[in-house]
Image (cartoon, helix red, strand yellow):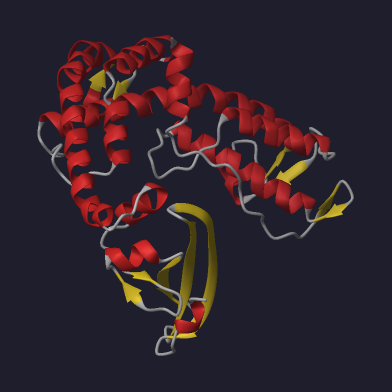
Amino acid sequence: MYRSALRHLRSTLPLLAGLSMAPATAAASGQPGDMAEAGFRLGRIYAGLRALRRDPDTRDILRTPDAVDAEIEAWRKKGLRDQTLIRDGEFSEHPEAKQAQIPFGLMTGIAQEYRERYQLYLVKFGLRAAVQTLKSIREGYVKPTEDLEASQIASKERDGNSTRCAELVALGRTLDPAMTIAYDWTLDMIEKEICPALAEHVPAWVATARASYRARRAKEAAPFVAAGITGEKLDLLVTYVGVSWRLPGGEKTDAPARLAKAPVLYQLLDSQDKDDPRYLIYTVRRYQFSGDRIARVSESQARRHYQAAVSDLFK
């Protein structure tokens, strides 16, 4: 039961799949820059542990314990030894650090504590989401008839699952029976007041929200369906309803009849060049169709003066 709850949570939390590289200044295991890179990447692990110690929120980017172990083992295989000193600004907070350096061997203990605290974090995160979901639904902060996306409805259904709530409470008791969640909810309070209330309020809210979503999608799809558009092309146009599409050459159109006949459609996105506000960075997304099936999607970028023509981007 506990493992299923953890697996479900891991699929929903903000996890970091990879980290950017730091500038290289030193050498280890014979390769220039390895020590700077090692310090940077291992320092991010310690930063994650510090976040876990203070009860992280959705702004914190955390790696899974398995990814942490794999990172440490990878550097061990590259030649780092327990006595090897690794440097990063994050280590300045470590009690055994000297000039922001710690021995690599300390990463084993850091990883162990990280794993223990990460499980607790998963439980707290899930129960906090359950409390907030119930509050938003029961008090009407988020109405099921609003213009919600399918992913938003699925998120409410997941976070407001009463069975999952009970599983997390049971797991929380094995980790920290005295824990409290947002608004000072204890595990006993959540079990008695939150989990049963989720079963009472969330399923009906989700059913209404999904019915509203289907009706809205059907209304938005109607002009495209009338023009004979089906399949993946229909799904795409409904997903971006209200967006002006471009044809080869750059002409804008939102006419269903013209969209139905177009074998290629474009989207144009732009953002200001941070180095020179006179210029825009354009991103052109190109959809190529085979009938109403999306055969290929590609993207390209171009930097242009804000007054320059862009029609040549739509080839």
What residue sits 74% from the left and 36% below the top? 104
**Can residue 100 be seen by looking at this rendering?**
no
Number of numbered callouts drawn: 0
Q: Eyeballing the image, is 206 above or below 240?
A: above
Towards the viewer: 290 or 269:
290
Q: Quadrant of residue 265?
A: bottom left
What residue sits 17% from the left and 17% below the top? 197
Question: Could you tell me which quadrant the N terminus lies in?
Answer: top left
Towards the viewer: 310 or 221:
221
Residue lying furthest right: 30
**Can residue 30 be seen by looking at this rendering?**
yes
Residue 241 image position (x, y, % from top left): 27, 58
What residue sits 42% from the left and 53% below the top? 292
Left or right: 232 as drawn, with respect to 128: right
Residue 210 image position (x, y, % from top left): 22, 34
Left or right: 294 as drawn, with respect to 140: right
Residue lying furthest bottom: 307
Q: Quadrant of residue 240?
A: bottom left
Towards the viewer: 309 or 34:
309
Left or right: 70 as drawn, with respect to 117: right
Residue 157 image position (x, y, % from top left): 28, 28
Left or right: 54 as drawn, with respect to 209: right
Q: Eyeballing the image, is 311 above or below 294?
A: below
Q: Eyeballing the image, is 133 above or below 31?
A: above
Residue 273 image position (x, y, % from top left): 46, 77
